[in-house]
Image: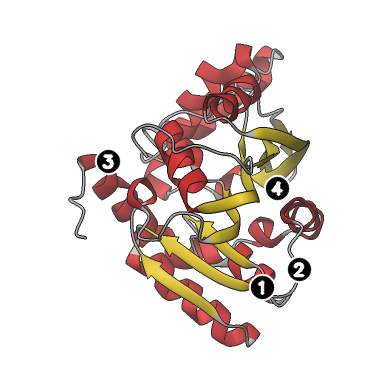
Amino acid sequence: MSVSRTPHDTRIVEQFTRWAKPFAELAIHAEAESMAQTLAACAVTTGMKVLDVACGPGIIACELARTGAQVTGIDLTPAMIQQARLRADSMHVSVAYHVGNALHLPFQADSFDRVVTRYSFHHMQEPGKVLAEMVRVCRPGGRIIVIDATPAPECQEGYDRAETLRDPSHTSALTLPQLVSLGADAGLSPVEMHQYRLESRLQDQVAPEDWNALQALFAEDIAGGQDCLGMGAWEDADGIHFYFPISIVVWSKSTHEKAIAGA
């Protein structure tokens, strides 16, 4: 079924077509400690059917495929899928990749043992509906794993301001209580939750035309000493550093799960 692309979808595709190769090569996206936490949360074993939603350049999908799982990845941006296929080839793993929309997953209900998405919900205008689709395609008893930035409630506005300036396809980063609430609304059972901070250097994450405005915003935040952006930014010899406040939230789909309205 063909799904029409919204203006926001177009914004995402434009942003990540431009950033596909740099994003794929950015070391923090495959950072060992956070990757280990991700794989532990997914708890994948050989032969499991796994779906990586908004898979980007296939970093998680390929790592999961190395465990012997049957992995499928889907992303809205064709350039990201191209990078993902190159990664799978270079790692000698098999992943079935699709270009498609997370709001309309082209898979049958109860198809996967694990459904995971990483660093995607802050791009979604309707993350609750995306989660509902993830629940629909997950088998009863399976796991749904969402990994994303979750700023402190008092920093959410500042965090969103900085991220929108850095990435125009950003919508809003949910706080951890907001993300947990989405799972409750979807009828999911909480399994586990972890948090970590992912350090980055500002100049590695910014397009040249946005550099001056972002540098000024971060410099003001550092000088104020209140961490209004919620990124713990600091100045070092090689520039401004900050961290993404990341949460891993794992739910299970009830074995007597009923269809979610609108899914």
Q: Amino acid at mark 2?
A: Thr
The reply to whether dot 1 and dot 2 touch (C-beta < 8 Å) is yes
Question: 159 and 9: which one is in front?
Answer: 9
Q: Amino acid at mark 4?
A: Asp
Q: Earlier in the sequence, mark 3 or mark 1?
A: 3
Q: Which residue is mark 1?
A: 69
Residue 71 lies in quadrant:
bottom right
Left or right: residue 36 versus residue 210 is right
Can residue 6 be seen here? yes
Q: Which residue is mark 4?
A: 238
Q: Which residue is mark 2?
A: 45
Q: Position of residue 259 (x, y in %)?
A: 44, 38
The colour scheme applied to this rendered structure is secondary structure
The reply to whether dot 4 and dot 3 touch (C-beta < 8 Å) is no
Mark 1–mark 2 distance (CA, rounded to whole Å): 6 Å
Disc nearest the viewer among 2 and 4: 2
